[in-house]
Amino acid sequence: MLQSGEVDYMSQIDKQKMTNRGHHSRKIRRRVRNSVLGFVAVLAVGFVGFTAYGYHTVSTTTKAMYKPSGATKERNASAVIKDKKPVSILMVGTDSNKINRTGSLMLVTLNPKTNKTVEMSLPDNLKVNLPGYKQYSPATVNQAYSYGGTKETVKTVQSYLKVPVDYYMAVNMNGLDKTVNKVGGVNVTSPQTFTNNGKTFNAGQNYHLNGANTGKFLSLRESDTKGYNQQQARQRAVLSALLKKSTSYKTVLNKSYLNTLGDEMQTDLTEKQMTQLALHYRHADQNVKSETVNAKSQKLGGKNFEVAPTSERTRAVNAVRQNLGF
């Protein structure tokens, strides 16, 4: 039997062992914790590095295509995207590498709250008044660019549809096949049935276009009854598909794609705004409604115009304003 002194001595030894085990256990926990924290830190640095690379890529490649329209913004467009409010983007299809003539015009409104997109097409010969060139009014809407470039085009569309144009994208239709090819193709619905260069497209049917068959889908055919108008409808279909592809976060960080856009496109969207669009408006294409300003041909003062009746203009305006939450 142990004496009391021996019991005290043994208790001290047990306590010391427990203390040592506690220290050892804490050391192990600290090592594990430090390893985990280190691993997390590596992941965080990697993520930040990737994000920084992504933003650097966007920043570098968008400088070539970034160009303010020059038109006064009717509202704080930056705040619109930042606050995830419905936004409007004017898609301008051009027929020149220097983007000095407009072909197709389409105002696209994206509503991230209702996940709805309204695409309002404007006939190129639509009769309008030019806000900055009243002496040449009335004129056709595509003449706005001839007189005052993007600035006058934005002002004219704003005045006609009575809504703010927050941003614009001007795309060279002649180089569109290259852009489509770079993004891995786009999906479109053919607005009419036609055959071009051995390829047949049926109205209402969906097609995946790549660089090779984009030209067949877009080029003007001599056999077109309404030739130019039908070509414009196809151009708008491709522009719409390209915009959807552009609002993909993956696409925004695709350097090859952005380099292609830099050669074939001008926009007043900054790199940050492009990323915000990709992040917060990507579901707006769940419900897409294609509209057009229906007009009738008239000859006024020796000029050919497409004139929209008051009721039709009101309908078009209301459709756009409603999707913008006005």
Image (cartoon, rainbow, N blue to C red):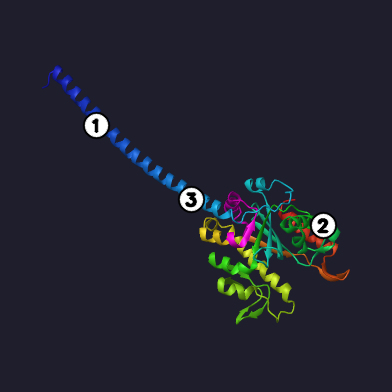
Would residue 11 be found to the left or right of residue 318 on screen?
A: left
- Amino acid type at circle 3 is Tyr
- Which mark, residue 217? none
Q: Where on the picture, by quarter, is residue 187?
A: bottom right
Closest to the observer: 218 or 295? 218
The x and y percentages for residue 108 are 69, 59
Please give the name of the residue rendered at 68% of the width and 64% of the height, measured from the top-left corner: 93
Q: In which quarter of the image is the N terminus?
A: top left
Please give the name of the residue rendered at 84% of the width and 57% of the height, measured from the top-left corner: 134
- Amino acid type at circle 1 is Arg
Q: Nearer the viewer, mark 2 or mark 3?
A: 2
How many numbered marks, from 0 up? Answer: 3
Q: Outermost residue, top direction?
A: 5
Residue 155 highlighted magenta (yes or no): no
Is 73 above or below relative to 137?
Answer: above
- Amino acid type at circle 2 is Tyr
- Pick whichever of labels 2 and 3 is earlier in the sequence: 3
Dot 2 lies on which element? loop
Return the residue at label 3.
53
Is 213 above or below relative to 275?
Answer: below
- Pick whichever of labels 1 and 2 is earlier in the sequence: 1
Dot 1 lies on which element? helix
User: Alpha-carbon neighbours of circle 2 within 10 Å: few (<14), some, or many (≥20)?
Assistant: some
Q: In this picture, which residue range is highlighted in magenta?
A: 261-286
Is label 2 in contact with label 3 (beta carbons under 8 Å)? no
